[in-house]
Image (cartoon, rainbow, N blue to C red):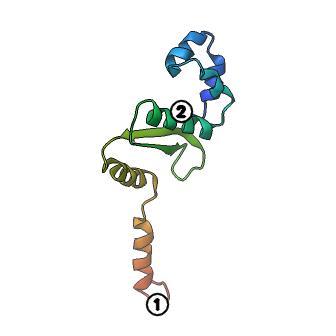
Amino acid sequence: MAVSWLPRALSAVKNKRLLQRWWGRDDWFHLKNMKAIQIKEAIVERFKGELGYKSVMAWPIYDRKGGKFIVYYMIHATDHPEAPKLMARAYNEAVQPRHVAEQSLLSFMQSSPRGEP
């Protein structure tokens, strides 16, 4: 769900019936005044309440690795009890930086007491 540009995109649509069909009900106009975090929460609640999923998580996707600007949320909805754990592992592996270079540097530094090769 691309929340970073959604309020602006909603304002640009001329045919309001398209927005009602996209959102699935007639209260879509509230989204225009919501912050990204509120839009995310509204979508999560709809997946839980209207679609009945047991677990719904919104995973932030950033503009770049290590960035702080959320471009969109990847919505993961499931009824399987193991799926949230699997998704968390996959997300953390994809988003978090790897520590391989840091470990190599530490090994190198330990080979010489003065840090010399």
Q: Which sits in the foreground, 57 or 13?
A: 57
What is the x, y in percent for residue 99? 43, 65
Q: Residue at x 66, y 33 (%)?
A: 34
Q: Is residue 41 left or right of residue 78?
A: right
Q: In the rendering, which numbered label is found on residue 113?
A: 1
| Res. 8 image quadrant | top right
Earlier residue among tags 1 and 2: 2
What is the x, y in percent for residue 106? 44, 77
What is the x, y in percent for residue 21? 50, 15
Which secondary structure, mark 2?
A: loop
Which secondary structure, mark 1?
A: loop
Q: Amino acid at mark 2?
A: Ala
Q: Is residue 57 above or below residue 23?
A: below
- Residue at the disc numbered 2: 2
Q: Amino acid at mark 1?
A: Pro
What is the x, y in percent for residue 92? 42, 54
